[in-house]
Structure formats: C-alpha cells, structure tokens
Image (cartoon, rainbow, N blue to C red):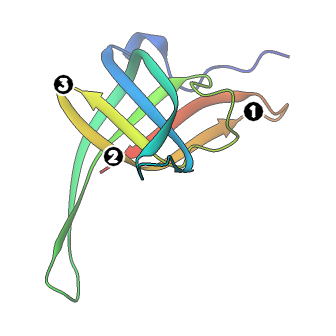
C-alpha cells in the first residue's frame, strides 16, 4: 500500500544544506560529520520568546520539512546544522515521521 506524502512537493522550494553529525567527537574535539544533504524543503521561520528564571531570552527559530528520509543511515537525528537563506542554524530536534508500515513519510528538523 502506498501512503500519501504529508509534505507536499509543491511547497518544498527553499534550497538548504543539512550537515548531520555523528555521536561523539573526533580527536580534535570537533563533531564528526555523518552526512551532508543538499536539497529543497518547506522552511518555516518562527520566533518564540520565553523569559526564564535567569531573565534570559530563548528564541526558537525555524522548522524544515523534507519529503521522505534525508538520512537513511542513522535511526535518529540528534545534531547538526542547516543553512538556509545564508544563515546557519543548529538542529535542536530531529523527527522522522513514520507510516504504519515503518517507512519514513517525512523528516522534520526543529532549528534554533
């Protein structure tokens, strides 16, 4: 059975570069690149300002939606960077939304 894509291809127009990191660091203490993906996505900017107990402001910046699985190797996406519109943002959370048969319908990256 073919499941419908929940991210419509017509709305994926923003060119991005995604760099995903492996768990752990190399001998220099730098993160190890696991995958570099260049393609298009549905990119949504958003800003949420929260006042913490330390009077610091935290802003969540954007979400990027991709059709299918952009990283078929790792089971989860735990860290990396996304460059869109000339701005590089860090991945706060990655999610692979799965169909009932276990295939990945879309990938969502929450960016800060």
Of labels 2 and 3, the one closer to you: 2
**Disc 2 from disc 3: Cα separation:** 14 Å
Mark number displayed over residue 99:
1
Mark 3 crowdedness (10 Å alpha carbons): few <14, some 14-19, many ≥20? few
| Residue 53: quarter of image | bottom left
Asked which secondary structure carries label 3, the reply is loop
Left or right: 28 in relation to 106: left
The residue shown at (76%, 28%) is 103
Q: Nearer the N terminus, badge 2 or badge 3?
A: 3
Q: CA distance from mark 1 to mark 2?
A: 27 Å
Which is more toward the observer, 14 or 88? 88
Q: Residues within 10 Å of mark 1 (few under 14, many from 20)?
A: some
Give the structural element (helix, strand or loop) at label 2. strand
Task: Look at 86% across and 16% down and name the residue there.
Answer: 1
| 35 displayed left or right of 40 | right
Figure check: 31 above or below 70:
below
Residue farthest to the top, as pictured:
10
**Residue that carries the numbered disc 3 in the rendered image:** 85
The mark tally for this picture is 3
Whether label 2 touches label 3, CB < 8 Å: no
> For the point 69% across and 30% down, which residue is it?
73
Q: Is label 1 in contact with label 2 (beta carbons under 8 Å)?
A: no
* Among the two numbered marks 1 and 3 on one chain, the one whose residue lies closer to the N terminus: 3
Q: Quadrant of residue 58?
A: bottom left
What residue is shown with label 2? 90
Q: Earlier in the sequence, mark 1 or mark 2?
A: 2
- Cα separation, mark 1 vs mark 3, equals 31 Å
Residue 111: give its label: none
| Residue drawn where x is 64% and y is 44% of the image | 76
Residue 89 lies, with reference to residue 24, above or below; the image says above
């Amino acid at each position: 059975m073919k499941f419908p894509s929940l991210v419509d291809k017509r709305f994926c127009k923003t060119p991005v570069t995604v760099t995903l990191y492996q768990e752990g660091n190399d001998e220099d203490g730098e993160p190890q690149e696991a995958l570099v993906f260049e393609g298009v996505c549905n990119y949504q900017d958003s800003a949420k300002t929260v006042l913490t107990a330390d009077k610091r402001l935290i802003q969540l910046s954007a979400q990027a939606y991709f059709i299918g699985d952009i990283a078929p190797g790792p089971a989860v996406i735990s860290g990396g960077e996304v460059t869109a519109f000339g701005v590089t943002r860090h991945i706060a959370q990655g999610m692979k939304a799965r169909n009932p048969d276990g295939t990945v319908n879309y990938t969502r990256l929450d960016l800060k």
